[in-house]
Image (cartoon, rainbow, N blue to C red):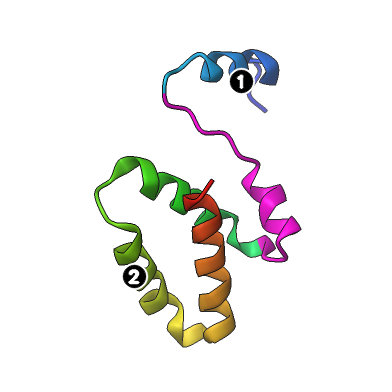
Amino acid sequence: NIPDYPQEDALLAELDALPRVARLDIEQLAKDQGIPKSANMILLGMATRYIEIITAEQMKEAISLIFYKKGEQVVADNLKAFNLGYNH
């Protein structure tokens, strides 16, 4: 729906030329790990590693607090996703 959007190959080549780029198919990884709704947490884990405004432990604590009302499995899934991204 964007007529002048660059081709994927050209866009990826430009990204690869940058000094600090991390690429990961977060949606596929989330599906492969059985946590398809947690792709955004994988991305958050990756971002936390690079932006360094909050520690991984602080972020995990925040994730636990945010999702605790949804149950232990939801917390566990989101922490698993966060760790996948952080450790990528």
Residue at horizontal 75%, vertical 57%?
Answer: 32
Residue 35: % across, % down: 67, 65
| Rendered view: 66 above or below 27 | below
| Rendered view: 64 above or below 58 | below
Residue denoted by label 2: 62
Residue 62: % across, % down: 34, 70
Q: Is residue 50 left or right of residue 25?
A: left
Residue 60 got which mark?
none
First of labels 1, 2 by sequence position: 1
Label 2: how many Cα within 10 Å (few below 14, some 14–19, many 20+): few
Label 1: how many Cα within 10 Å (few below 14, some 14–19, many 20+): few
Residue at horizontal 68%, vertical 51%?
Answer: 29
Amino acid at the residue labelled 1 = Leu
Query: Which of the pair 5/30 is nearer the observer?
Result: 30
Residue at horizontal 73%, vertical 57%?
Answer: 31
Residue denoted by label 1: 12
Amino acid at the residue labelled 2 = Ala
In the image, residue 12 lies in the stretch drawn in magenta: no
Residue at horizontal 70%, vertical 61%?
Answer: 33
Asked whether residue 45 appears in the rendered view, the answer is yes
Residue 48: % across, % down: 37, 49
| Rendered view: 54 above or below 13 | below
Residue 1, by quadrant, is top right
Q: How many marks?
A: 2
Residue 24: % across, % down: 61, 39
| Rendered view: 68 above or below 47 | below
Q: Is residue 28 left or right of residue 57?
A: right
Quadrant where the C terminus is found in the figure: top right
Which stretch did the figure color magenta? 20-36
Q: How far apart, in angstroms, are the residues tagged by discs 1 and 2?
A: 33 Å
Helix, strand or loop at label 1? It is: helix
